[in-house]
């Protein structure tokens, strides 16, 4: 018999002895027998979860009572908070029929869903649920996971927010910049997952892209003086304008320079360029999203792939690296430098990038630069390494084809 079985047998024995005293003591404190029984059961569940893992405490009866009392106190505090909220609701002017929640409420909801107390996955799920209007099933399908997993993620996120006492409000003062970055990051991640899926059979998931684009538009409407909100909207609009040309009839990826530019959505591109102009016209320095939008705009303004201003793109990546340095960014800069100044110059940037060995895009870029430099055997190995590392089937097919050339 293992130590876990022994601990569970101890829980049963202690429970038989202590439960009447436990319920009685709790009933005296709460003046509610039913509530006392529920609290005692909660303490029993906690013991079953904890004792097999951490060992049986020296005084099991006192442990059960202390645990139940903490649950009771949490419950009273929660009830008091709900009572206060109820009083505020009762005193508030009721919304006339047809009136919707105001912009401040929506902005507060966005900041709450993207609170830094939550992990990135939880922020994304909660935002898509509360602000994107997606059902749990739809979020699960988008992220190739189970509905139960998403439900648990959302339930845990709400619990974390409640336990952390996160208020439903728009932050101000010193807190605002960090909270805004968190909101922008969530919208950006949602779009990127749709634009180049990390796993699965489809390289592109347009629904996720347009969900993110809708959230970015909402954010700009709610915070029209925020430079990076306009920068993000510009970036996502320009990127989204290429969705129709980004995959072939069978779903195979088509890289940017090989795309039929007549298939780019001109309205989205125009909107993206206009958003970039608004971002640059606002006071304050351009941030990482605005600089990425400026890079995307260079591609958008080139009528043909050969017209691309790679020197300017390389300079923009260098500027981006000064405010948001990362190995991923350096891999992208290597591409631009390779086009602007030759493949060997790009390879030098790539070698210095410090990209993780399992980052498949670094191998893919290396293969491309080596191929342009005429180092075909090395290029083949690099493409095969990238194909081995990617978790997306469509991308693996593309990389394997490039290795075979």
Image (cartoon, rainbow, N blue to C red):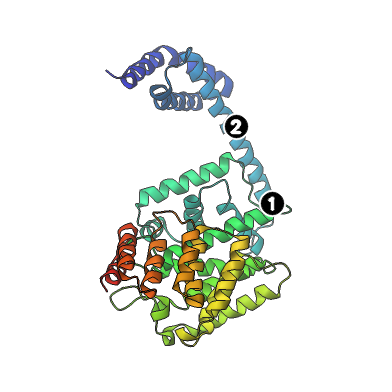
Q: Is residue 346 above or below residue 8?
A: below
Foreground: 314 or 271? Answer: 314
Q: Is residue 26 above or below residue 173?
A: above
Q: Residue at x 72, y 52 (%)?
A: 174
Foreground: 40 or 139? Answer: 139
Q: Is residue 223 left or right of residue 65?
A: right
Q: Dot 2 lies on which element?
A: helix
Q: Residue at x 62, y 45 (%)?
A: 166
In the picture, the quarter occupied by the N terminus is top left
Q: Which mark is residue 76?
A: 2
The answer to whether one can see residue 232 in this image is no
Q: Position of residue 106 (x, y in %)?
A: 61, 60
- Give the labeled residue for mark 1: 175
Which one is in front in this view, the residue at disc 1 or the one at disc 2? Answer: 1
Q: Are marks 1 and 2 in contact (CB under 8 Å)?
A: no
Q: Residues within 10 Å of mark 2 (few under 14, many from 20)?
A: few
Q: Residue at x 50, y 64 (%)?
A: 349
Determine the CA span between mark 1 and mark 2. Answer: 30 Å
Q: Residues within 10 Å of mark 1 (few under 14, many from 20)?
A: few
Q: Position of residue 190 (x, y in %)?
A: 47, 62
């Amino acid at each position: 018999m293992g130590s876990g079985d022994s601990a569970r047998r101890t829980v049963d024995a202690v429970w038989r002895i202590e439960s009447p005293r436990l319920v009685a003591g709790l009933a005296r404190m709460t003046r509610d027998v039913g509530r006392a029984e529920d609290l005692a059961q909660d303490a029993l569940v906690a013991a079953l979860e904890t004792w097999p893992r951490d060992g049986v405490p020296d005084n099991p009866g006192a442990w059960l009572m202390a645990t139940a009392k903490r649950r009771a106190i949490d419950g009273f505090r929660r009830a008091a908070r709900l009572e206060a909220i109820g009083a505020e609701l009762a005193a508030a002017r009721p919304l006339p029929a047809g009136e919707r929640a105001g912009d401040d409420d929506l902005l507060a909801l966005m900041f709450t869903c993207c609170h830094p107390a939550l992990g990135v996955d939880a922020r994304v799920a909660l935002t898509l649920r509360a602000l994107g209007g997606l059902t749990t099933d739809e979020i699960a399908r988008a992220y190739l996971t189970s509905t139960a997993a998403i439900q648990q993620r959302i339930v845990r996120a709400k619990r974390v927010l409640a336990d952390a006492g996160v208020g439903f409000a728009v932050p101000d003062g010193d807190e605002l910049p960090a909270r805004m970055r968190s909101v922008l990051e969530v919208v950006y991640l949602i779009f990127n997952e749709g634009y180049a899926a990390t796993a699965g059979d489809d390289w592109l998931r347009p629904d996720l892209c347009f969900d993110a684009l809708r959230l970015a538009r909402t954010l700009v409407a709610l915070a029209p003086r925020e430079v990076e909100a306009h920068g993000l909207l510009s970036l996502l609009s320009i990127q989204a304008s290429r969705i129709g040309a980004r995959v072939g009839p069978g779903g195979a990826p088509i890289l940017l320079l090989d795309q039929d530019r007549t298939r780019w959505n001109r309205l989205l591109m125009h909107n993206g360029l206009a958003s970039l102009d608004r971002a640059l016209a606002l006071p304050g320095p351009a941030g990482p999203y605005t600089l990425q939008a400026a890079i995307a705009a260079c591609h958008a303004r080139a009528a043909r792939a050969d017209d691309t201003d790679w020197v300017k793109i390389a300079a923009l990546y260098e500027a981006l690296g000064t405010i948001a340095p990362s190995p991923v960014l350096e891999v992208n800069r290597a591409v631009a430098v390779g086009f602007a100044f030759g493949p060997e110059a790009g390879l030098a940037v790539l070698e210095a990038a410090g990209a993780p060995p399992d980052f498949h895009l670094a191998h893919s870029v290396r293969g491309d630069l080596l191929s342009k430099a005429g180092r075909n055997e090395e290029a083949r190995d690099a493409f095969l390494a990238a194909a081995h590392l990617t978790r997306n089937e469509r991308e693996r097919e593309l990389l394997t084809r490039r290795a075979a050339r």
